[in-house]
Amino acid sequence: MAIKIDNHANARPQSGLETAAAVYELPVEASLTRFIALFHDQDSPYVGPNRSGRPTDPTLVAPLGATFVISGAQPWVQGVLNKYDINWFGEIRGPAFRISSRRAPHNLYVNTELVRTEADRRGFDDAPPPDMFTWGEFPADAEAATEIFFDWSSTTKVTWTWNGSGYERSTGGATQDWISQDGETQQPIEMDTLIVLYARKYTASGSTGSAVPAMETVGTGLAQVFAGGKVVQGTWTRASADDLFVLTTEDGSVLEVPPGRPWINIFPDNRTVSW
């Protein structure tokens, strides 16, 4: 399943990211980003804050066959979700609940076990997803990269720092944490691998409602994979939104991604990632 996660300052620290099998990050309006947390063979009773869908989301969810959980979406965005045959639902009692310790819209959370129950009730497909990438080992001579800076926008600056076992996230110079449901555990967001897929950012709109940022995820573009304090650069290609991303190195061979939990950045190709 795929759960849309808020990344506004008032939504932090988020919950459930520490359990997710993988996470997408991509731009939204107001120079912010949002996440899509992917869950496969693990669950969490407390994932969020859950927020609304955007037109790029179905192009990332479609090849995985995932049930997509959002707080809602503009009618024209719902049309895009349906165009890609995404099994989705918005805020419904049971899988989703609101907490009193935060203000709306940053107070909606999701229980993934109850998402599975609701998806089964609706007859959604529950076939296992395909492997997202070709898994393997980095070349021994890969370039060192232990602190990676993402210049998402004029106001969103993210750094991932290799700590010897994973990459820890900071935003705006401060550590970005996850927090448990009982509030007793709060630790830095950490992932095994960072994948950067550079894509064209554009404005999408429908016949009514608001225009929003979107990313072109079909075609080809620069790719970078960070793992073990190193980086390999290459290219991503994709013939359609129903296909998986294919990563190749600069010499055209398969760019293998070391096994682990990946954080996948759908990153504007007019911005920079440095290390």
Image (cartoon, rainbow, N blue to C red):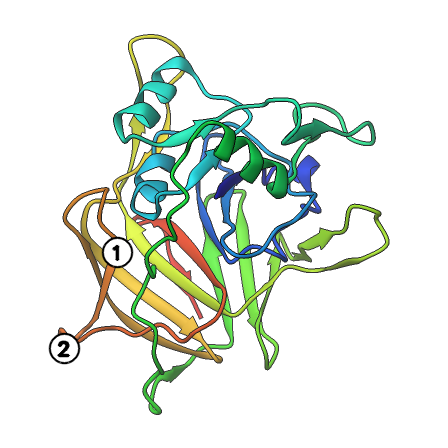
Q: Is residue 104 above or below residue 138?
A: above
Q: Residue at x 39, y 31 (%)?
A: 87
SS state under label 1? loop
Which mark sits nearer the N-terminus, 1 or 2?
1
In the picture, measured across the screen, residue 32 lies left or right of residue 221, that is right
The image shows residue 26 at horizontal and vertical percentages of: 43, 44
Q: Position of residue 177 (x, y in %)?
A: 70, 55
| Residue 5 visible, this angle | no
**Residue at left 57%, top 36%?**
117
Q: CA distance from mark 1 to mark 2?
A: 17 Å
Residue drawn at x 46%, y 48% is 25
3 sits to left or right of 43: left
- Which of the 4 image quadrants contains residue 49? top right
Q: Position of residue 24 (x, y in %)?
A: 45, 50
> What mark, if any, has residue 181 been given in the picture?
none
Task: Pick the residue in front: 162 or 153.
Answer: 162
Observer-nearest of 235 and 202: 235
Residue position marked by numbered label 1 in the rendering: 245
Pointer 2: what residue?
Answer: 251
Q: Residues within 10 Å of mark 2 (few under 14, many from 20)?
A: few
Q: Is residue 250 above or below residue 170?
A: below
Q: 10 Å neighbourhood of mark 1: few (<14), some, or many (≥20)? A: many
| View extreme (bottom): residue | 140
Element assignment for label 2: loop
Q: Amino acid at mark 2?
A: Asp
Residue lying furthest top: 208
27 sits left or right of 236 in the view: right
Of residue 264 and residue 143, the one placed in the foreground of this image is 264
State whether residue 81 appears in this view. Answer: yes
Q: Could you tell me if the residues under marks 1 and 2 are in contact, i.e. CB atoms within 8 Å?
A: no
Residue type at the position of mark 1: Phe
